[in-house]
Image (cartoon, rainbow, N blue to C red):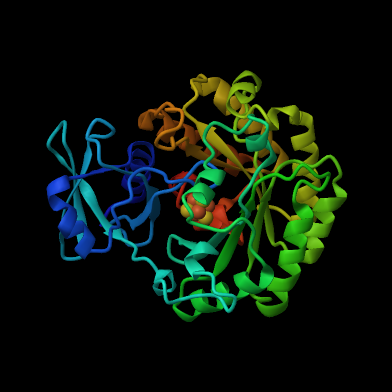
Amino acid sequence: MIDIETVLAQKTELLCKGLYLDNELIPQYRKHGIDIDFGRKGGAGPSGGRYFLLEDEHTLVNVALWNNSDKTELFLKENENNYFEIYNNNTKDSFGKLKLIQNPQFYNPEFKTSDGIPMKKIALVHGIDCLASTIYQKCVYWACGEACTFCGIEVSLQNNATIEEKTADQMSEVITAAIKEGRCAHMTLTSGTDETIDKGANRYIELLKGVKGIHPDIPIHVQIEALEDLEYLNKLKEAGADTIGIHIEVLNEKIRRDITPGKFHLSYNTFERNWKHAINLFGNNQVSSYILTGFGESKADFLKDVEKIISIGVIPYITPVRSIPGKKDLPITNFEDLIEIYKESAVLMKQYGVNPLENRAGCVRCGGCSAIKEAYKAS
Ligand code: SF4
């Protein structure tokens, strides 16, 4: 069995590099449940990929799959005894083994909501038991040409993989189906930003009320950009949100302007006001922010900025940025640097009493896209 240091190293390297699928093995992969669906095909936020478990059987990792061997030296080999072997094509050494997490049954086209929408278009299972959905698949920043460079929210819509807006009834039906097969213990809800003053909070509130009325025991995480009017955070909490992600994405102000030009109009201080208010409302360890790596800041500067948000009580959900094929090619994070960043962030979290293992719902609880929890366990 692999130890926690190896888990941290393997997971971080996989997050940064993804896996190359050998063309000759495609029939084999299909037989074992890997759809041939390379790179990111869309989705909000910075991630997207297939879910695997490391050899310890409980560490989850969301891995990008590539059909171009220039993208990564980590090659996925045959499946033996339920594990895919991985080897490093440069060194020819064995890297480790991964178990594919199978897709849920409700992805099959015969599973539809009562208004006839395939359930797969309403919500997806991330990892083992985190049901996730983008409740509104459009974003004001796309409309005005100021979209975040890593975001694929409207690509999913163009690919007909989803519908523009989901209702509480549709969501509740998919939750019921997912619970039935053991694939929903908590939820992540995300959304594009609305141009209205509530930034989409009202849409969440309506949906939360409906879903919580039917599924009061499913903890729900919502993700929203920083608000000018903090009253909406109170309303989100009242409507049933259990945890919240207020995502700044990039902490360095100069890089933030380039990478998230639309969101950059919100000052860092606005984020800080939101985080502090949210921690008072949602409690310790229930407020997080995605922080992306790979944009060239020095490690020392990056960690200084990360310490600032940890000291407030925010969980930094640090994850390497991942490009969407056909869109801007984003830099690849050096995995060795990222391991150091994770380790030092974990030490900071312990120093300031922030514990990601106590988060109740959403990305931090799921943990597929960041090794922050593994670093915390290892520290
Ligand atoms: S951390 Fe989990 S829930 Fe969040 S985007 Fe990644 S896989 Fe989905």
Along the line of sight, which residue is nearer the eye, 334 or 64? Answer: 64
Q: Residue at x 31, y 59 (%)?
A: 56
Q: Residue at x 22, y 49 (%)?
A: 96
Q: Image quadrant of residue 185?
A: bottom right
Residue 286 can be seen in this image: no
To which quarter of the image does residue 166 belong? bottom right
Report the side of 173 relative to 270 (left or right): left
Query: Toward the viewer: 54 or 357?
Result: 54
Q: Position of residue 170 (x, y in %)?
A: 61, 71
Tell whether 24 sits left or right of 278. Answer: left
The correct choice, above or below, for 359 with respect to 112 in the image is above
Q: Position of residue 234 (x, y in %)?
A: 83, 56
* One can see residue 294 in this view: yes
Q: Is residue 46 above or below residue 359?
A: above
Report x, y in % for residue 230: 85, 46
In the image shown, does 99 or 224 lie closer to the viewer? 224
Instruction: Locate residue 312, reporting x and y percent.
Output: 72, 39
- Residue 281 lies left or right of residue 327; in this view the side is right
Numbered marks: total: 0
Q: Nearer the viewer, residue 95 or 163?
A: 163
The N terminus lies in which quarter of the figure?
bottom left
Q: Is residue 200 left or right of residue 25?
A: right
- Seen in the picture, residue 193 relative to 326 is either above or below; the reply is below
* Residue at screen point 56% across, 45% down: 153
